[in-house]
Amino acid sequence: MPDTGQTLAPGRAVLTLPNVISLARLCAVPCAIWLVLHRRFAPATALFIAAGISDALDGYLARRRGGTTLGAILDPLADKTLMVGMFVTLAATAQLPDWLAILVVFRDLLIVGGVALLWVTSHPIAIEPLMISKLNTALQISLIATILALNALSLAAMPLRNTLITLVTSSTLLSGAAYVIRTARPA
């Protein structure tokens, strides 16, 4: 199970406020995708920002009140579903290069596949986000928010888009390689 920094309290209520917020964020993903597919970028931008605020809020509440096992799974699931959904949808609508969406999704699958392989082979699994991975996530969020906002405002800003695409590409490659190298090293 991922180490989220939360204290897990078995036997606690499943529908805690942080879990309800994470579940709402997960349920908002199809709406965000639909908005982008129908080129409704202003509400898509607002929904993406609201998702970011809800992520911060449910994390804060979980740390204060103690997290749950469900929350430790639901929160990252909602986050990854939103990010992958946005990358794939923005690529499908030609707002991002398709190769970038493939790279982002492949990196995530590589990490999940590596964890699954370690689990199946009974190797210890220590999931700690690397600094490069945290930077990668921040850059991915910045890219998606920027693309949505630029479209909402009918602005091109190609130098900004291209710079963010380059930064996300680099950080995605570096973070994927860092996880592979760290996992391949003997304990």
Image (cartoon, rainbow, N blue to C red):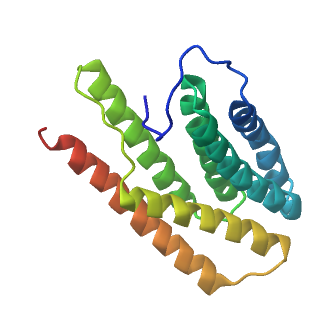
Q: Position of residue 181 (x, y in %)?
A: 21, 50
At a point 62% along the width and 18% down the height, the residue shown is 12
- Quadrant assignment for the C terminus: top left
Q: Residue furthest left?
A: 186
Q: Nearer the viewer, residue 150 or 70?
A: 70
Q: Nearer the viewer, residue 19 or 78?
A: 19
At a point 69% along the width and 84% down the height, the residue shown is 157
Q: Nearer the viewer, residue 22 or 102?
A: 22
Q: Position of residue 183 (x, y in %)?
A: 23, 42
At a point 63% along the width and 47% down the height, the residue shown is 60
Question: In the figure, is residue 24 to the left or right of 9?
Answer: right
| Number of residue marks | 0
The reply to whether residue 81 is in sight is no
Q: Position of residue 38 (x, y in %)?
A: 86, 54
Q: Residue furthest top?
A: 11
Q: Position of residue 70 (x, y in %)?
A: 59, 24
At a point 44% along the width and 40% down the height, the residue shown is 109
Q: Is residue 120 above or below residue 144?
A: above
- Quadrant assignment for the N terminus: top left
Question: In the figure, is residue 111 to the left or right of 103?
Answer: left
Question: In the figure, is residue 128 to the left or right of 14?
Answer: left
Q: Nearer the viewer, residue 187 or 168?
A: 187
The reply to whether residue 35 is in sight is yes
